[in-house]
Amino acid sequence: MNTTLASYHESTVLTAPPGRLVAMLYQGACRFLAQAAAAIEADNPEQANRRLQRAEAIIDELRRTLDPAAGEIAENLAEIYSFCLRHLGEARVERDAGKVIDVRDLLADLGEAWTAIVAS
């Protein structure tokens, strides 16, 4: 069953159009951030760190794949992603689930906007 689910997820990613992939990245980051916040609240720093690392990797991937030709939009997104990474670093040091939730909420808003753009 587990390998069937993994195969399904892999197939979904490999066949998704680029716009859908970005939406999936936002969703994944938000999921990992929610898990990290819960781990912080449960006083489980190892789990929180693992989930933060996964979310940070997604945010870094979103930042690295920005197209500079998009101009101001790409610049603004780069700044938002940098803010998110800094804020998560602070959350890790301070063990502050609220800061993690702040980033999750910001990325959720971006993800919703991206999904609306892709759907139109």
Image (cartoon, rainbow, N blue to C red):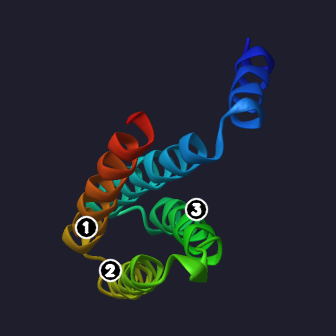
Label 3 CA crowd tier, 10 Å (few <14, some 14–19, many 20+): some
Question: What's under tag 2, amino acid-wise?
Answer: Ala
User: What element does badge 1 sit on?
Assistant: helix
Q: Report the Cα–Cα distance between label 2 and label 1.
A: 7 Å
**Label ID, residue 39:** none
Label 2: how many residues lie within 10 Å, few (<14), some (14-19) or many (20+)? many
Question: How far across and down, in percent of the image, does residue 34 sit?
Answer: 34, 52
Q: In the image, what residue occupies the spot 26% across and 55% down?
A: 109
Residue sitting nearer the eye, 76 or 107: 76
Tell whether label 1 touches label 2 (CB within 8 Å): yes
Residue 12, position as x, y percentages in the image = 69, 28
Q: Whole-Å distance between the Cαs marked 3 and 2?
A: 15 Å
Q: Which residue does the numbered mark 1 point to in the structure image?
A: 97
Q: Position of residue 88 (x, y in %)?
A: 38, 78
Image height check: is 6 above or below 29?
Answer: above
The residue nearer to you, when weighing 44 against 4, is 4
* Residue holding disc 2: 91
Q: CA distance from mark 3 to mark 1?
A: 16 Å
Quadrant location, the N terminus: top right
Residue ID for mark 3: 54
- Is disc 3 placed on a helix, strand or loop? helix
Q: Type of residue at label 3? A: Arg
Observer-side mark, 3 or 1, equals: 3
Residue 19 higher or lower than 9, as above or below: below
**In which quadrant is the C terminus drawn?**
top left
Residue toward you, 6 or 117: 117
Looking at the rendered structure, the secondary structure element under dot 2 is: helix
Q: Earlier in the sequence, mark 3 or mark 1?
A: 3
Please state if 91 lies on the left or on the right of 48 as rendered. left
Q: Quadrant of residue 4?
A: top right
